[in-house]
Amino acid sequence: MDPYKLGEMEQKFADLIWERAPIGSGELAKVCEGIFGWKRTTTYTMLKRLCLRKLFVNDKGIVRVETAREDFQAAQGEQFLEENFDGSLPRFLAAFSRRKKLSSQEVEELRKMIEEWGES
C-alpha cells in the first residue's frame, strides 16, 4: 500500500479530519454519517487505514493529526516527481508549461522561491 496515494473517499475523509482535528471518534462518526452517509463501522475502518499510514492517531477516542496536510502533500508531490519525471522538477515544469502557459505572477513566484533556495 502506497503511503502517499489515497483513494477519493480516503482523501475526502482525511481532509475532513484535517479540518476538524482534534475530534472525538464518536463525533467523527456522526459527522461522517451526515456528510457521507457512512455507518459508524465504516468510519472506524477508514480511520484505521489512515492511522496505519501515519496520517492520524486515535488516542483514547480522540483523533489527532500525526502528519500535517502540507507535509503529506509535499510527500505526494515528491513521489509524483520520482515516478513520472525521475525526480526532476525542471523536467516537470518544462512539461507543465508546454500545455499551460505560466502567468507573469507565477513566473515571479518561482523566481523568488529559487532565489530563497539559493540563499539557504
Image (cartoon, rainbow, N blue to C red):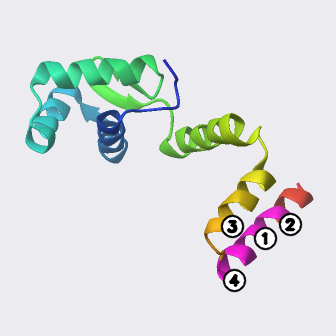
Which quadrant would residue 118 be assigned to in this image? bottom right
Residue at 51% across / 33% down in the picture?
A: 67
Mark 4 nearby-residue class (10 Å; few <14, some 14–19, many ≥20): few
Q: Earlier in the sequence, mark 4 or mark 3?
A: 3
Quadrant of the rendered image containing residue 79: top right
Lateral position of residue 35 relative to residue 105, left or right: left
Secondary-structure class at tag 3:
helix
Q: Is residue 83 above or below residue 99?
A: above
- Queried whether the magenta region covers residue 66, the answer comes back as no
Q: Please tell me how crowded label 3 is: few (under 14), some (14-19), or many (20+) other residues with Cα within 10 Å.
A: few
Image side of residue 37 versus residue 85, left or right: left
Residue with the most extreme right position: 119
Residue that mark 1 sits on: 112
Residue 45 percent coordinates (x, y): 25, 18
The answer to whether mark 3 and mark 2 are in CB contact below 8 A is no
Q: Residue furthest front?
A: 99
- Label number found at residue 104: 4
Residue denoted by label 3: 97
The Cα–Cα distance between marks 4 and 2, rounded to whole angstroms, is 16 Å
Q: Which amino acid does label 3 sit on?
A: Ser
- Residue 73 located left or right of residue 82: left
Q: Can you give x and y, in whole percent of width and height, for residue 119 in the image?
A: 91, 60
- The percent position of residue 97, horizontal first and vertical second, equals 69, 67
Mark 4 vs mark 1, foreground winner is 4
Q: Is mark 1 on a helix, strand or loop?
A: helix
- For disc 2, the marked residue is 115
Q: Kindly report which numbered mark, 3 or 2, lies closer to the viewer in this rendering.
A: 3
Magenta range: 103-115
Per the model, the C-alpha gap separating discs 1 and 2 is 5 Å
Say which of marks 4 and 2 sits in front.
4
Q: Distance between the residues labelled 3 and 2?
A: 20 Å
Q: From the viewer's perspective, is residue 7 above or below residue 42?
A: below
